[in-house]
Image (cartoon, rainbow, N blue to C red):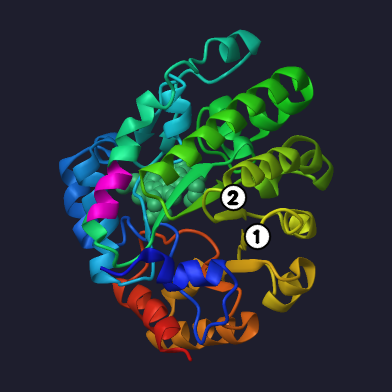
Amino acid sequence: MTDTKDHLLLKALRGESLKRPPVWMMRQAGRYLPEYMVLRRKYDFFTRVQTPELACEITLQPIDIIEPDAAIIFSDILVIPQALEMEVQLVPKVGPYLPKPIEQSSDIAALNREGLLDRLQYMFDALSLTKKELKGRVPLIGFAGAPWTLFCYMIEGQGSKTFSKAKAFLYQEEKAAHELMDILTDAIIEFLKEQIKAGADVVQVFDSWAGLLSPADFNRFVLPRLRRIVEEVKPYAPVILFAKGSWYALEDLAQFSPALGLDWTMEPEWARSKTGGVVLQGNLDPSALLGTPGQVEKATREMIDAFGPTNYIANLGHGLMPNIPVENVKTFVQTVKNYA
Ligand code: CP3
């Protein structure tokens, strides 16, 4: 058994000089894999998430089939609102649905913070089991949603292109908005620390909707909280911060986050110029994997050439989509592995 600290992902996160970067993909366990679809037909989403044996099996599927350099635990960012005792459903073809969204401060007061980590025990069990089953093959990544992205779903009650209800709440209920985001920030920090204790070698924070905010609102509501999360968790394990769409804040995020995930709207050279010696992760447009394998290989090589093999983790700019051919996902990973 190899000690995971010798694995490429950990080396990259320590800034060691490498011949090729490590590679993994957001949503590498998911609907593009026929093996996942078999389990998806048998068990509903939160059964898959909350049964450690199933979460472990799903996490390992891409490790066996695609062979990336890291595993990411199969779960969801909405487990925090759920553990705060909001009802969360995953409705087929609709996505996340919270039938009783937060509307006023009394709804925030009703969130149950007592025993929060106990209600997330299945996730820690899934991490420990997966860590054991991995037998040191690759490191294990844990994760949580960021306060703003969780806030979006908790106020809006479902996915949205604009999250205008959530944004209106920032202005109309500013005090309550800060209060809710502080509750989430505390919960996220505790949750991530416990995931590390359970076996996560690295954790990633997903702020999927950061790009909806103006720089001024991002600085007011989001940036100080992301800073607190990264600073409080990074003494325990490397933290990767993925604030999608927040190119305008990249320089500020680089001041405190040693690793940053990037979406595909940024040139690698430009991102490097804003972030100094920070480890960057990303950023191929997932749609590029809808081209031919030859096109995937070319785009992937160009991306590594531009970022360079050191201080870099090859990944996509967002999650894999259900319509991406497995062959192209393999080509993406193999191209990174053959680089050097
Ligand atoms: O990356 C991984 O492989 C680990 C697993 C993972 C899932 N969700 C599994 C999942 C991770 C890291 C997430 C995070 C997540 N969940 C985010 C942040 C990352 C991002 O994509 O921006 C968000 C915003 C969510 C909320 C959520 N959960 C959405 C928007 C959806 C998709 C709804 C849909 O129908 O596409 C989910 C469900 C979900 N989470 C699926 C998976 C594999 C699809 C479930 C299924 O239908 O089988």
Give above or below for 83 relative to 54.
above
At horizontal 25% and vertical 41% (from top left) the residue drawn is: 48
Viewer-side residue, 283 vs 255: 255
The answer, for residue 26, to whether it is visible in the render is: yes
Q: Between marks 2 and 1, how big is the CA–CA gap?
A: 9 Å
Q: Which residues are magenta?
A: 126-132
Would you call the spot at circle 1 few (<14 residues within 10 Å), some (14-19), or many (20 or more)? Answer: many
Disc 2 and disc 1 in contact, CB within 8 angstroms: yes
Dominant SS in magenta: helix
**Which disc, if any, is residue 234?**
2
Viewer-side residue, 283 vs 224: 224
Q: Is residue 138 magenta?
A: no
Viewer-side residue, 94 vs 217: 217
Q: Amino acid at mark 1?
A: Pro
Residue designated by label 1: 258
At horizontal 72% and vertical 25% (from top left) the residue drawn is: 178
Horizontal side, residue 251 vs residue 200: left or right: right
How far from the left and from the top, in percent, is residue 44?
24, 37
Give above or below for 294 relative to 67.
below
